[in-house]
Amino acid sequence: MPVTSQEEHPGDLSAFADLPDPRRRHCRHPLQELLLVAFAGIASGAQDWVGVSDWGALKLDWLRRFLPFEQGVASHDTFDRVFALLDAKAFEACFIRWMQPLCPAVEGGPTIAIDGKSVRGSRTGGAAMVHLVSACHTASGLTLGQVRTAAKSNEITAIPELLDALDVKGATVTIDAMGCQRDIAAKIRERGAEFILSAKDNQATLAQAAQCLFDHSMRDVERGLLQQDITLDKGHSRLETRRAPPG
């Protein structure tokens, strides 16, 4: 994979150049410095803003290789306040633009998994828990982008929005049964990718048709006309054995 500008210079946050700073006056800690510490700290294992600020203080000499940090690293209260005030949509667009060059080119058929998850600990007062639809480059483990939705049922409208923000040409996109929709399949093909969609009994006719197809193929396996493929997966405290005819 060719070396990207971000790999040569981790402090290159030009993708965030048009992200508005929500603070109205001159501040001791420029927004780009806060972004660099936050991204590097979280990537290094920091779990909260206290951890991010402490990590930045320990790595200040390294951070100054990329940005001045004339006033040192901000306190955890500053990180908390500024990130809470950022325009979420603008930040999301900048983040996707910044992440895209960090990932290996998708040409050649890698897998991008799209899934929705509720964010633990995001419920505050009477507000509902935050639900995010994310796209993950499975080979590298990188999150390419995400879209916030009001509820799990809104994933159907959020998935096309996420696909429009990503370059998935040449990849195989996987989505669970929630995304098994004609419009979503059409959007994936429109973006130049292949898809693997799950079908469950909420799509009764489709699920029955798929079951009949697999039953027919397995009968050919039993007759020795086709060779069976077997894969083993371990995760979520269970071992799964999948048997299917090739192709």
Image (cartoon, grey):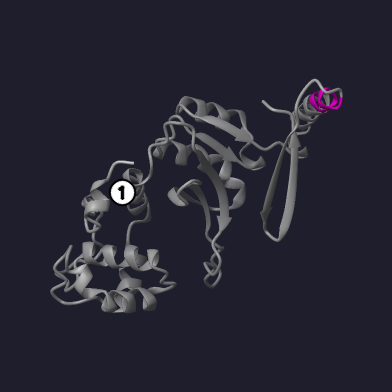
In which quadrant of the rendered image does the N terminus lie? top left
85 above or below 177? below
**Residue at figure coordinates x 62%, y 47% from the top left:** 153
121 above or below 210? below
The one of 202 and 243 positioned closer to us in this rendering = 243
* 165 in magenta: no
- In the image, the segment drawn in magenta is 217-222
Q: Is 245 displayed left or right of 100 in the figure?
A: right
In the rendered image, residue 66, in percent from the top left (x then y), is placed at: 18, 62
How many C-alpha atoms fall within 10 Å of the one at disc 1: few (<14), some, or many (≥20)? some
Q: Is 126 displayed left or right of 24 in the figure?
A: right
Q: Secondary structure at mark 1?
A: helix
134 above or below 199? below
Q: Find disc 1 in the rendering and name its residue.
A: 98
Q: Main secondary structure of the magenta part?
A: helix
In which quadrant of the rendered image does the C terminus lie? top right
Q: Can residue 76 be seen in the rendering of this structure?
A: no
In the rendered image, residue 208, in percent from the top left (x then y), is placed at: 80, 29
The picture quadrant where one finds residue 121 is bottom right
Q: Is 92 displayed left or right of 122 in the figure?
A: left
The picture quadrant where one finds residue 230 is top right
**Residue at figure coordinates x 45%, y 31% from the top left:** 108
- The amino acid at mark 1 is Trp
In the rendered image, residue 182, in percent from the top left (x then y), is placed at: 61, 28
Pick out the residue farthest to the top: 225
In the rendered image, residue 20, in percent from the top left (x then y), is placed at: 24, 56
The one of 116 and 244 positioned closer to us in this rendering = 244
The one of 48 and 213 positioned closer to us in this rendering = 213
**Residue at figure coordinates x 57%, y 45% from the top left:** 155
